[in-house]
Image: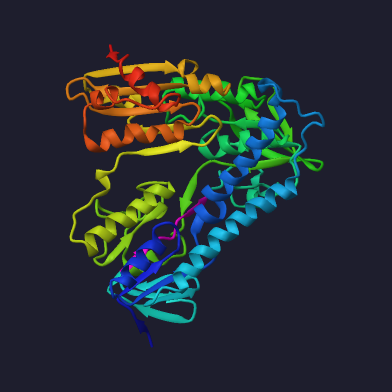
Amino acid sequence: MSDSFDAIVIGTGQAGPALAVRLAKAGRRTAIIERKRFGGTCVNNGCIPTKALIASARAAHVARTAGAWGVVVPAGVAVDMRAVKARKDGIVRKSNEGVTQWLRKTPGLTVIEAHARFEGPHTVRAGDALLEAPQIFVNVGGRASVPPLTGIDEVAHLDNVSMMEIDALPAHLLIVGGSYVGLEFAQMYRRFGSDVTVVEMAERLIAREDADVSAAVREILEAERITIRLNAKCVAVGRDGDRIAMQIDCEQEPREIVGTHLLLATGRRPNTDDLGCERAGIALDQRGYIVVDEELRTSVDGIWALGDVNGRGAFTHTAYNDYEIVAANLLDGERRRVSDRIPAYALFTDPPLGRAGMTEHEARASGKKLLAATMPMSRVGRATERGETAGFMKVVVDAETKRILGAALLGIEGDEVIHSLLEVMYAKEPYTTMERAMHIHPTVTELVPTLLGRLQPVA
C-alpha cells in the first residue's frame, strides 16, 4: 500500500531542501528523500570543505612567504594535517546538521532516509515504503567519473570525496585532470607541502577558457613549483612498490612519473544509474543526464529535474537557481527559464578567476562587432599594496549595443569583483553605466571603470 503526498523531492542537494520547504509552507504535503548525507555535494565534499581546506592552505602559504611583507616567522611553518582536517570536518558537520534540522523541523514535510527509485511515473520506492505524488522533483546530483585508464583498477586512487578523508600529507600527489577541481587541489596540497604533478590531456589547462587565461593560470601555478604536463595522454598506471607509477604518452620526458597518491579529477557523471528512470519513462541523454526543457520539466508530465543531474549547470549556484525557477513558476505565477541566467562561476585558486558571460573566443564566434580591453593586475593599487599582482582583467563588449558580453577577472578578489559586472549584464545596461560610476579607493573594483575606458575594436 502506498503513502500519498502532494509532492516528493528526491535528494537534498542545493535545490531540494529549499524547494521542499517552500512546497510544505505553501500547504502541500511533501516528502523529501535522502539516501546518504544531507546537503549533497556542496556541503559534504564540494564547495564548503574544499574552500575550508583552501583557507588553511592559504594561511600556510602566507606564513611561509611572510618575509615578503617584512614579517619574520622565526620557527618556520609546519602544517598539521590532522588539525586541518578536523577544522574542515567541523565546518562540514555544522552545515550538514543545519540542513538536516531545517528539514526535520519544517511542518508538513516528511523526511525519509532511504534510497529512492522510480517504480512508475508518479510512484517512488524509498526503502520499504512506496510513495505516490502528482509532482516529483529529482535532485540527486552527480559523482566523480573514473577515466578508462589501463591499470586503474590495480592502484588506489582518490576522487573529490575520498580526498576529504586524508589526514596526512601526500609526499607526491599525482593529479589527472587540469581543470577546476584538479587545479584547486593542486595548489592546495602544494601549499600544504606536497610535491604535485598535474597531468592534462589537452594542450592547455582549463581548456574552456581563453588561451591567455589558461596561460596565466599555468604561470601562477608553476611559480609555486607545481609541475604541469600538457598534451599528456595518461595511458597507464601501475604499482611501483608502495608507490604509483604513471606512464604518459607524450613527447616530453620523463614519460613515467612516480608518486605516492593519485587523484582523478576528470569530470563527473549524473546519479541516474539506479534511479529507475526507465520505469518512469524519463528521457536521458547519451551521458545519462535527465533531459529537461527551459522550465526544468522532464519528458514526463509532473516530474522536474534540478541541479547537476539535468546537465544544465554543474555548480551550487546553478542548482539553487534551478530551485528558484521551479518555485517561481509553480508557486508565484511567474515564467522563469534557464536561458534567463548568465553563465557565471569561479576557479578558486589563489588568486581566483571570476568568470561571467562569454569568453572572448565565444564572443568572436558569435559574429558580433566587439570591443575588448585587458589590464594587468599590477595596475591595481589594492593588488600592489597587498603584494598580489598576478593575473589580469579582461572584458568583451557588443560594440553596437554597448552591453557587456563577458568578463574574466583573474586576480586578487576576482571572484567577488566579477559580480559588479554581472549585475550590469543582468540589468542590460550599457558598459558606460559602470564606466561612469564612482567607486571607493583603494579597492579592486575601482579599476573596472578604467578597464572599460580602454575598450578598443576587436579586429
Q: Which residue lies at the image location 66% right of the left edge and 47% below the top edge?
A: 157
Where residue 17 appears, x then y in whole percent?
A: 41, 64
The one nearer the camera, 455 or 130, is: 455
Where residue 78 appears, x then y in whole percent?
A: 78, 37
As for residue 142 lying within the magenta part, the answer is yes
The one nearer the camera, 433 or 236, is: 433
As for residue 347 lying within the magenta part, the answer is no
Picture quarter containing residue 192? top right
Q: Total number of numbered labels?
A: 0
Q: State the predominant SS element of the stretch in magenta.
A: strand
Decide: is 85 above or below 190.
below
Locate residue 391 relative to residue 65 in the image: left or right. Answer: left
Where residue 144 appears, x then y in whole percent?
A: 53, 49
Picture quarter containing residue 133? bottom left
Q: Quadrant of the C terminus?
A: top left
Decide: is 382 above or below 198.
above
Decide: is 220 above or below 54.
above
Picture quarter containing residue 282? bottom left
Q: Which residue lies at the image location 69% right of the left edge and 47% below the top edge?
A: 84
Locate residue 337 relative to residue 221 in the image: left or right. Answer: left
Magenta residues (range): 136-144
Q: Is residue 390 visible?
A: no
Q: Quadrant of the N terminus?
A: bottom left
Locate residue 341 relative to residue 239 in the image: left or right. Answer: left
